[in-house]
Amino acid sequence: LAQAGCGTGKSFAGVVPAIDHSKKTGKPVVYATATIALQDQLAHKDLPFLKTIFDFEYAVLKGRSNYVCLQKVDEWNSPAKATIQKLALDPEFSGEITDVPNGAAIKSEITTTSEECPGKRDCPFGEICLAEKAKTKAKSANLVVVNHAVVAADLSIKAKQEAVGVPSDKVTGILPTFSGIVVDEGHELEDYVTSALGDTITAGSFGRLASEISNFLGTRDAARDLAGKAEAVFVVVKRALEKHRRDPKHRNDRQAPFTSDTLNALADPILALVSSLEDFEHKVDNTQVIGDDKKAQQRKRLVKKITNSIDKLRHLMTADFTELVRWMTMPQGKKGESIEWAPL
């Protein structure tokens, strides 16, 4: 454990023995930072400098939403499409959205998330996937630079596989098998892990999903139905928050914990929302897309997204109080009331 001010050399102090350890064990060492900014500093400044002194290889690994999705680009209707497709052919291209011209402005159009990605085997671009390319490069590196959220997501994915009986030697995650880990900015680790392993839902999140479903099906039924069902859920949340704040001890609280009464009050509206999502999942999955490969991939991603939403709601309602912490939060800015949770 070490603590020192900015510019003292903490990163070098962690990286140098990590390289040595990797060479002795023949496996990568993971170097985890709290922020992508520090990740980028290491990748673009500190590690290139150290490579002039030591012989080692490093790789940067970020969450899937930080990489260009070639399937989404293929579906994209934009004059910039050809430019990005050409860029993807460059073997030196990292695949990261930060290395795409005007990438921040078009990120939502050309990236995907783990919640909707069908996976390498089920994607036409799976063999040349840029996120998978980064994971492959990481396997042969001495040092794999990630952030705390990626470490947490890796743990979560592996834990889920073990929970359903996958043998320990077959369990795989985001990170390669590593021989050690350095946690930089360790004071931030708790909050990042809570955020990465937990989740949140708002009425708006279901509104956006409903719009996607409606656009895919070519009808406004989903938008109307899901919006109404989600609103019924958050009416209960709003009442529970108001009741909590009526207590003089809590009148300034912006958050309120779940109680058994809260879960009971939410049971029927959440069951109705889940039922509606299941109906639309069935409709999307059974939509004919013969001869339209792009539409077929959109369908696959949307079905996975709906399935994940259903799983979230079920987990929220069925998890025991000893395994999950649940709470409600008052509106903030344009964001309405939210339900949030994290593993205990």
Image (tube, rainbow, N blue to C red):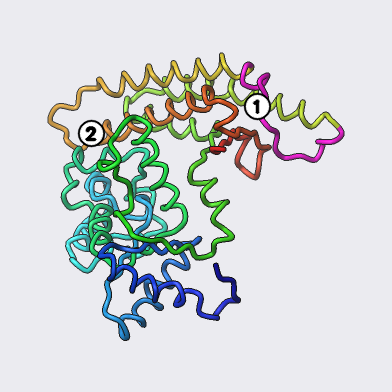
Instruction: Classify residue 208 as left or right of residue 112.
Output: right
Question: Mark 2 to mark 1: distance in Å?
Answer: 37 Å
Which residues are the magenta region?
248-264
Whether pointer 2 and pointer 1 mark residues with C-beta atoms closer than 8 Å, the reply is: no
Name the secondary structure under disc 2: helix
Q: Is residue 101 visible?
A: no
Amino acid type, label 1: Val
The residue where tag 2 is placed is 295
Q: Residue at x 37, y 71 (%)?
A: 43
Q: Nearer the viewer, residue 229 or 267?
A: 267
Instruction: Classify residue 146 as left or right of residue 201.
Output: left
Total marks drawn? 2
Return the x and y of residue 303 as percentages of the image width and height: 32, 29
Instruction: Classify residue 314 as left or right of residue 157.
Output: right
Few, some or many C-alpha atoms within 10 Å of disc 2 (few <14, some 14-19, many ≥20)?
A: some
Return the x and y of residue 272 as percentages of the image width and height: 50, 15
Q: Which mark is residue 237?
A: 1
Q: Quadrant of the image for the N terminus?
A: bottom right
- Asked if residue 323 lies in the magenta stretch, the reply is no
Amino acid type, label 2: Lys
Q: Nearer the viewer, residue 194 or 270?
A: 194
Q: Given this view, does label 2 or label 1 mark the residue nearer the observer?
A: 1
Q: Is residue 246 above or below residue 19?
A: above
